[in-house]
Amino acid sequence: MYWSNTFWTMKPVRRERMAEPRVLLTAFSPFGGETVNPALEALRRVPGRVAGLEVVKLEVQVVFDTCTEAVMQAVRACRPLTVLCLGQAGGREELSLERVAVNLMDAERPDNAGRTPRGEPIDPEGPAAVFSTLPHRAMLAALREAGIPAQLSDSAGTFVCNRLLYGLLRALKTEFPAVRAGFLHVPFLPEQAVRHNSPIPGMAAQDVVRGVVRCLEALAES
């Protein structure tokens, strides 16, 4: 099942599958002049079912002001057990399990709507930081056992990835407190790393996909 909010349309959930355990997997569109996003490429290649979970897929636009509500619309529609968001972190050499989101938007480049916030809070009344509710240690162990380079990260940056994680965790706590959620950053693809003259070669698409699948398997086991 694949949904996209690129044009603010979603395919309906098929009624006969509503009773199945479900995970919502999201990934951002390309941004910053890139024609591909490794997170989105992985999203497209992950199977529709993993370890007994139905995987509902959502493409999210790289826009500060709309990303959280786009994901929450999908959560309200498909009622997943878990939400795992994917995003690009060019220059990193490992999959990064993000443990915290900070109440800050500070962009060096515009988002896909042309907005470039500098030092703005996401929510002036909100906490300074919020923590992901995923089983990070179990996911990290699963990745490393599969031979996939991975790390725990305490910085999701201050761009749209962090904005989505912060807003999503706050919204879920209010509307769906039992739903777990978190964020996985993935490196450049090798072809992107070459264009950027990155000293880090990036990670092959098939390895990113394997990593995402292992994370989903760990979520199912937990």
Image: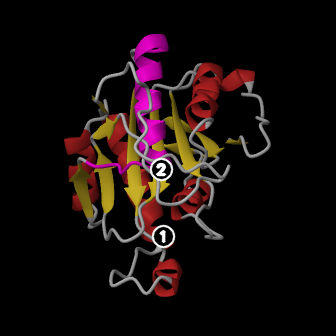
Give the quarter of the image for residue 74.
Answer: top right
Q: Is residue 79 visible?
A: yes
Q: Which residues are magenta?
A: 155-176
The quarter of the picture where the N terminus appears is top right
x and y, in percent, of residue 30 in the image: 62, 61
- The residue tagged 2 is 86
Q: Residues within 10 Å of mark 1 (few under 14, many from 20)?
A: few
**Is residue 160 located in the magenta-colored stretch of the structure?**
yes
| 2, above or below 39, in the image | above
x and y, in percent, of residue 81 in the image: 46, 25
Q: Nearer the viewer, residue 189 or 161?
A: 161
Taking the spot 52% from the left edge, 64% from the top edge, the residue there is: 38
- The residue tagged 1 is 206
| 75, above or below 139, in the image | above
Taking the spot 45% from the left edge, 75% from the top edge, the residue there is: 204
| 54, above or below 35, in the image | above
Q: Nearer the viewer, residue 157 or 169?
A: 157
Q: Is residue 179 visible?
A: no
x and y, in percent, of residue 59 in the image: 64, 47
